[in-house]
Amino acid sequence: MNLIVGLGNPGYEYMNTRHNVGFLVVDKFLEDKSVEEELNERTFIGYKIEYYDKRALVIKPMTFMNLSGKAVRDALELYDITLEDMLIIHDDVDLELGRIRLKAKGSSGGHKGMASILYTLGTEDVPRLRIGIGRGEEEITTYVLSNFSKNEIPIVIDVINVAARAVETFLRYGIERAMATYNNKTVEEVLRGKVL
């Protein structure tokens, strides 16, 4: 089984903030999928799905961003999933809005949710999908917890659509194929092409 984790903060007040794009990508990915079972575990809500010949558990941690590692560890242990079969989806201020990037491993890049996951699991060998949100002029915590501007929303919609397709590619073909397909391309380039 694969594990797909969208990072974010629970609660209505955080729903459409920049920090919650992981949740938004998961919602988009699940939109046209048949959910086998809905789960309400202590540290996450989850959905079991089958996509082509792959089975996946798709979760949203309910621990708040800075404690995401606990939810991820719980899901891995409860469902006996290996690290290479997992994909973490999170926002990234170091990527401009309109870009996504997949990595097979690496540091947290300063992202508190990712740092919690790497610390809790004791390894940096964690595949992830980074969603660019750009870097604002205000203090970083204020910026990531702000809503997207009216002008940014059309770009965000496209980014979420492309990111959901990248998750599908990861599930079907693995992280290397997903990296080769989506990295170093803008969202516009992906949408114009015939990218799976």
Image (spheres, rainbow, N blue to C red):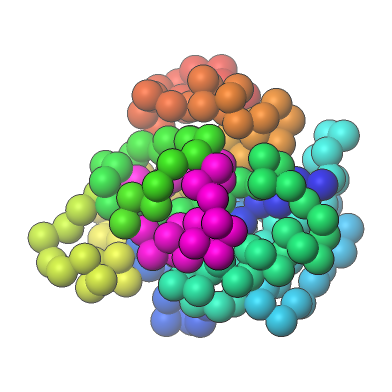
The location of residue 21, given as percent across then percent down, is 45, 57
In this rendering, does residue 46 appear at all? yes
What is the residue that sits farthest to the left in this orientation?
A: 137
Q: Which quadrant of the structure image shows residue 5?
A: bottom right
- Judging depth in this view, the residue of 47 and 12 nearest the camera is 47
Specify whether residue 124 is painted magenta.
yes
Above or below residue 105? Residue 9 is below
Residue at 71 percent of width and 81 percent of height? 42
Quadrant of the image for the C terminus? Answer: top right
Query: Closest to the observer: 132 or 83?
Result: 83
Task: Find the magenta span and give its range.
Answer: 111-132
Which residue appears at 81% of the width and 66% of the height?
78
Return the residue nearer the eye: 17 or 107: 107
Q: Is residue 145 left or right of residue 137?
A: right
Q: What x and y, as percent, mark residue 143?
A: 23, 66
Q: Residue at x 72, y 64 (%)?
A: 75
The image shows residue 155 at horizontal and vertical percentages of 35, 44
Q: Is residue 140 left or right of residue 74?
A: left
Q: Identify the residue at horizontal 51%, vertical 82% (top origin).
A: 11
* Residue 47, picture quadrant: bottom right
Spot occupied by residue 31 in the image (x, y as percentages of width and height): 68, 53
Res 66 → quadrant: bottom left
Instruction: Please check the rendered image and state whether residue 114 is part of the magenta-colored stretch, yes or no.
Output: yes
Visible residue check, residue 21: no
Spot the residue most to the front: 122
Give left or right: position of 102 versus 48: left
